[in-house]
Image (cartoon, rainbow, N blue to C red):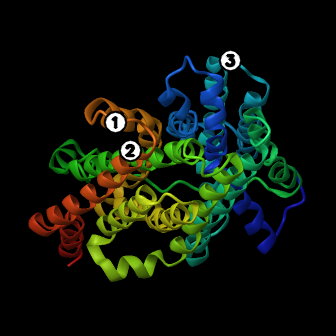
């Protein structure tokens, strides 16, 4: 067994794992070069290489609980990080699109282990307020730093050749080595006793009490899919706009995407105050802010304007991700909590995967426009439309979270 890191050193060690959470963006600066190298492949297929890891991560993430029952968390984490690096570096040596697609899926399988593991280990080692603080820092701030490293590093490396962008996936070595040396295996927690209900008691339980899927969770997941698709529509088309309009090179793309990711850092830190200020409308307002940021990108024909738009969009994204987890916590019963949190991951991963295809269908096939700047407009309209319609729905019908909270209060009374 390794010599256990203690105190702040252990906190830092566990938080390092979250640096890989948004690593899929490392491929974004390589997109223009790859599109030129593979002219026979549809552009949306190449764009989906950015989001494919997130989709593959969903598949493995759904099995995460079972995997932790069969293997030690240390072994599982090391395996996930190793296949993450193998899949990440592989495209640097490949000139076959099918093989590159397989490599990107392998990254996702690694992410399906490391992404939930970062939050799971925090829950294993800490509790109470300390745990909540670390989850917030890991879910937003550390992930933002990791995104900057992968996007900016990939941009610098892609200047000479798009293959070189994938060398950025060697970065996790500096995480893996201290994990091997100092990360202990967490102690096994005792499972809470499960009460066995009689058949008649089960029959009287609602779907929420049984931990089953309900309309509010399904609706929230569908919205998450749509919003994640809009985000990927922006991230996968901004590189095309920058290069095709002569605004910059792959290094510029890395800088722009890094500015977007960096802006999520402070937003996650003041999320609690933001939610308290806007109450039940905090998510619709976040969508509208995202739409305003993307609108700035659309109307800007200079790098300074595009960066401003990315910063505004990044601030909204720093509110959206913890916002969706918070939303599920508000609308799900205690029995549905794991289901609801899992569906946030499913919505995010699936939405990111279909993003390029969704944007292509709306922009090209329905509106008859070309991908690129027109796709940015499609995303802006989508963000603002969802935000406004959801706010109207909440005002007319009331918020299910408010009703659920009132029901809980009545039961407690």
Rendered image quadrant of residue 109:
top right
Q: Nearer the viewer, mark 3 or mark 2?
A: 2
Q: Are marks 1 and 2 in contact (CB under 8 Å)?
A: yes
Which residue was labeled with disc 2?
374
Left or right relative to 260: residue 365 = left
- Residue at 50%, 79% (x, y): give it: 270
Residue 46 at what x, y percent from top left?
Answer: 55, 29
- Residue at 52%, 68% (x, y): give it: 308
Q: Are marks 3 and 2 in contact (CB under 8 Å)?
A: no
SS of the residue at dot 3?
loop
Which is more toward the observer, 308 or 209?
Answer: 308
SS of the residue at dot 2?
helix
Left or right relative to 315: residue 38 = right
- Residue at 86%, 55% (x, y): give it: 178
Tell me which numbered mark, 1 or 3, is placed earlier along the sequence.
Answer: 3
Distance between the Cα atoms at labels 1 and 3? 29 Å
User: Does residue 7 show up?
Assistant: no
How crowded pointer 3 is (Cα within 10 Å; few <14, some 14-19, many 20+) is rated as few
Which residue was labeled with disc 1?
369
Residue 96: mark in rendering: 3
Rendered image quadrant of residue 129:
bottom right
Residue 33 at what x, y percent from top left?
Answer: 66, 33
């Amino acid at each position: 067994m390794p010599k256990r890191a203690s105190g702040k050193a252990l906190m830092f060690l566990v938080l390092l794992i979250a640096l890989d959470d948004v690593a899929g963006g490392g491929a974004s600066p390589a997109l223009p070069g790859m599109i030129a190298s593979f002219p026979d492949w549809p552009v949306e297929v190449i764009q989906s290489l950015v989001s494919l890891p997130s989709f593959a991560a969903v598949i493995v993430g759904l099995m995460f609980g079972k995997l932790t029952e069969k293997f030690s968390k240390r072994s599982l984490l090391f395996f996930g990080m190793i296949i993450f690096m193998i899949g990440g570096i592989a495209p640097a040596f490949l000139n076959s699109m099918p093989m590159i697609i397989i490599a990107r899926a392998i990254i996702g399988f690694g992410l399906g282990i490391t992404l939930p593991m970062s939050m799971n280990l925090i829950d294993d080692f800490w509790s109470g307020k300390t745990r909540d603080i670390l989850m917030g820092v890991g879910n937003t701030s550390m992930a933002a730093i990791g995104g900057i490293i992968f996007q900016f590093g990939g941009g610098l490396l892609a200047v000479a050749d798009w293959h070189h962008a994938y060398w950025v996936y060697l970065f996790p070595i500096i995480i893996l080595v201290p994990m091997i040396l100092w990360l202990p295996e967490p102690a096994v927690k005792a499972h809470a006793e499960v009460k066995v209900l009689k058949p008649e008691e089960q029959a009287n339980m609602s779907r929420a009490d049984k931990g089953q899927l309900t309309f509010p969770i399904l609706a929230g997941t569908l919205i998450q899919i749509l919003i994640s698709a809009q985000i990927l529509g922006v991230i996968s088309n901004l590189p095309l706009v920058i290069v095709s309009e002569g605004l910059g090179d792959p290094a510029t793309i890395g800088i722009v995407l890094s500015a977007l990711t960096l802006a999520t850092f402070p937003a996650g830190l003041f999320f609690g105050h933001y939610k308290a200020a806007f109450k039940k409308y905090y998510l619709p307002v976040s969508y509208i802010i995202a739409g305003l940021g993307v609108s700035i990108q659309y109307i800007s024909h200079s790098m300074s304007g595009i960066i401003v738009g990315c910063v505004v969009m990044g601030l909204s994204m720093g509110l959206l991700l913890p916002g969706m987890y918070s939303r599920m916590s508000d609308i799900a019963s205690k029995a549905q909590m794991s289901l609801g949190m899992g569906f946030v991951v499913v919505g995010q991963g699936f939405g990111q995967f279909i993003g390029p295809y969704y944007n292509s269908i709306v922009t090209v096939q329905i509106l008859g426009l070309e991908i690129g700047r027109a796709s940015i407009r499609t995303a802006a309209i989508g963000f603002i439309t969802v935000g406004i319609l959801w706010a109207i729905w909440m005002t007319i019908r009331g918020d299910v979270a408010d009703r659920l909270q009132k029901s809980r209060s009545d039961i407690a009374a």
